[in-house]
């Protein structure tokens, strides 16, 4: 047991209490952020004349050597310390002696941990953004290749109207693009430095909070000191953004699972991204997509966990807040792995355009276009709807698609039909006539793709 307090205690902490209280087993992953924050703090203290330059330099050297040793694996972070803050400070004192005891001047672990978590989340938001960017690139490549790949668009999971694979994938492009914007929003909102808030009420030392904030790349210091040490909104916001990413990945996974099934055969996942069965030799399972879908629940759980932890907390810091970490770490690890794997899976998937088009035809997705054909020749829409419906009935009885009916059969329902009906209801025509902005028609889709390509080129990876 090595702890930073003890002066007012007359008894040793019970070992079980110590273990229950300790956070080192998980907050050790904050060691870089903790050291970085301490370095900025010490620079500021010396600039304000609270430490001498010599003390500053000794502390900085000590902190650098700890960082280096941990990175190189020469210094192990062990359970003998209560948390990462105690670990770093105790090691510093061991290494440089008296000067090390001055590091914590004008600081509390409350503003220290608030800073560490913010720095950590800020770093990870950028990683999430980079992974989304990679996924968007892969999706856009698929879109570019499949502007003419016709497939059924569904509502109620019933075939509705023909779209293209480019258009369908483009819908997900929009979702992940919004996810990036959401990360950008929360990044801007959280980019303020809580250091200098002290335990809750600031400090009597003449700290320059603007300077520390600047050193750490923040927009500026946070305002109210009580809020600064007890605010975890940014972590909740990040968990929400991560949850929404998972929701999007999960919906997409569900479709990939369906499309990869024997019934659909719209695509085949690469062998490298599929798994087999221990008993059924013929099986090739979409486990990655299923796991991504499954892990969505656990990320939602992390969000609900933190919201619930925070809901009854009086101001300012309470130990409950130590519970912010594991959920956030778990969500980050989970989402980053899911994004990475999902991107690889999509990049290697093999699409089957013929199967998609055949399915669109079999599902009468051009029945609306047959009705529109009549409307364009003066038949009122309500009548045209009925005629087209009866044609579908006829096809169902014969087990054929609309395109397979003879002109006579068309004419039995309406004399308005002519030879050009076949062209009018061809998948190509049905899709390419849909030219409203955002629709699947070739021209509209090419415009959407151009805009998306521009967006990717302009925004680069989040900075
Ligand atoms: N391990 C603690 C946490 O993660 C650090 C802050 C401790 N502060 C305190 N007053 N006990 O929240």
Image (cartoon, grey):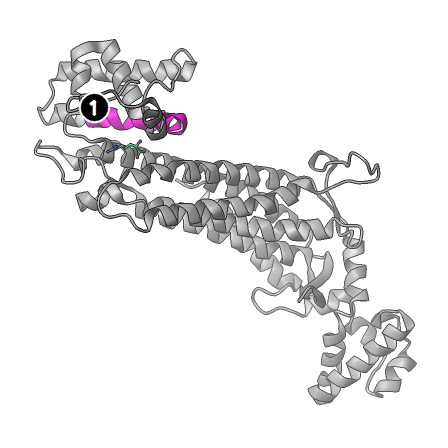
Q: Nearer the viewer, residue 458 or 414?
A: 414
Residue 246 percent coordinates (x, y): 53, 48
Q: In the figure, residue 274 lies in which quadrant? A: top right
Q: Is residue 51 visible?
A: yes
Q: In which quarter of the image is ligand 1?
A: top left
Label 1: element kind:
loop
Q: Is residue 125 left or right of residue 316?
A: right
Tell me, yes or no, whether the highlighted magenta stretch contains residue 430.
Answer: no
User: Relative to the observer, which residue lies in front, 78 or 383?
Assistant: 78
Q: Percent from the top left, x then y, of residue 268? A: 75, 45
Q: In this picture, is 340 found above or below 74?
A: below
Does the Cβ of the disc 1 residue fall within 8 Å of ligand 1?
Answer: no
Q: Residue at point 78% right, 72% down?
A: 425
Decide: few, some or many residues near mark 1? Use Cα within 10 Å; few <14, some 14-19, many ≥20.
few
Q: Position of residue 35 (x, y in %)?
A: 30, 24
| Image vertical order of residue 32 relative to residue 432, above or below | above
- Residue denoted by label 1: 5
Along the viewing direction, whichever of 388 and 229 lies nearer the viewer: 229
Q: Quadrant of the C terminus?
A: top left
Q: Position of residue 408 (x, y in %)?
A: 92, 82
Is 255 left, or right, of 57 in this rendering?
right
Magenta run includes residue 30: yes
| Residue at (16% x, 20% y) in the render | 102
Query: What residue do we see at 18% from left, 30% from top?
Result: 107
- Of residues 311 and 440, the one nearer the viewer is 311
Q: Can residue 83 be seen in this view?
A: no
- Looking at the magenta stretch, what is its main secondary structure? helix
Q: In this view, does 146 lie to the left or right of 317?
A: right
- Magenta part of the protein: which range? 24-41
User: How many numbered discs?
Assistant: 1
Q: Quadrant of the N terminus?
A: top left
């Amino acid at each position: 047991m090595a702890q930073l307090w003890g002066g007012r205690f007359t008894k040793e902490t019970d070992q079980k209490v110590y273990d229950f209280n300790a956070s080192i087993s998980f907050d050790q992953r904050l060691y870089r952020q903790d050291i970085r924050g301490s370095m900025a703090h010490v620079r500021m203290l010396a600039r304000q004349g609270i430490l001498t330059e010599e003390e500053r330099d000794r502390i900085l050297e000590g902190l650098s050597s700890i960082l280096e040793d941990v990175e190189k694996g020469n210094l192990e972070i062990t359970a003998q310390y209560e948390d990462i803050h105690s670990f770093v400070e105790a090691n510093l004192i061991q290494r440089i002696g008296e000067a090390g005891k001055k590091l914590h001047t004008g600081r509390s672990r409350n503003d220290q941990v608030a800073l560490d978590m913010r720095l950590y989340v800020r770093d990870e938001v950028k990683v999430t953004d980079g992974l989304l960017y990679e996924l968007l690139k892969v999706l856009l490549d698929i879109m570019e290749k499949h502007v003419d790949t016709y497939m059924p668009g569904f509502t109620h999971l019933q075939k509705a109207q023909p779209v293209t694979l480019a258009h369908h994938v483009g819908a997900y492009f929009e979702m992940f693009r919004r996810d990036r914007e959401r990360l950008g929003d929360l990044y801007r909102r959280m980019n303020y430095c809580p250091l200098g808030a002290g335990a809750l009420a600031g400090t009597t030392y003449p700290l320059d909070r603007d300077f520390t904030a600047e050193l750490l790349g923040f927009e500026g210091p946070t305002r109210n000191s009580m809020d600064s040490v007890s605010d975890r909104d940014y972590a909740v916001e990040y968990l929400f953004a991560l949850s929404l990413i998972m929701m999007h990945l999960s919906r997409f996974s569900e479709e990939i699972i369906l499309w990869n099934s024997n019934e659909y055969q719209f695509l085949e996942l690469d062998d490298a991204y599929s798994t087999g069965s221990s008993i059924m030799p013929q099986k090739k399972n979409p486990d990655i997509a299923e796991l991504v879908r499954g892990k969505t629940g656990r990320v939602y759980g992390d969000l609900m966990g933190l919201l619930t932890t925070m809901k009854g907390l009086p101001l300012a810091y309470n130990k409950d807040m130590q519970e912010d970490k594991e959920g956030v770490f778990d969500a980050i690890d989970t989402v980053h792995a899911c994004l990475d794997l999902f991107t690889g899976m999509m990049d290697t998937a093999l699409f089957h355009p013929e199967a998609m088009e055949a399915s669109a035809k079999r599902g009468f997705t051009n029945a609306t276009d047959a009705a529109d054909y009549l409307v364009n020749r003066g038949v009122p829409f309500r009548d045209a709807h009925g005629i087209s419906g009866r044609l579908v009935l006829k096809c169902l009885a014969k087990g054929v698609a609309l395109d397979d009916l003879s002109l006579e059969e068309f004419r039995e329902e309406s004399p308005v039909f002519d030879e050009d009906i076949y062209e009018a209801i061809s998948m190509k025509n049905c899709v390419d006539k849909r030219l409203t902005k955002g629709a699947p028609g070739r021209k509209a889709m090419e415009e959407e793709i151009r805009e998306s390509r521009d967006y990717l080129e302009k925004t680069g990876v989040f900075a």
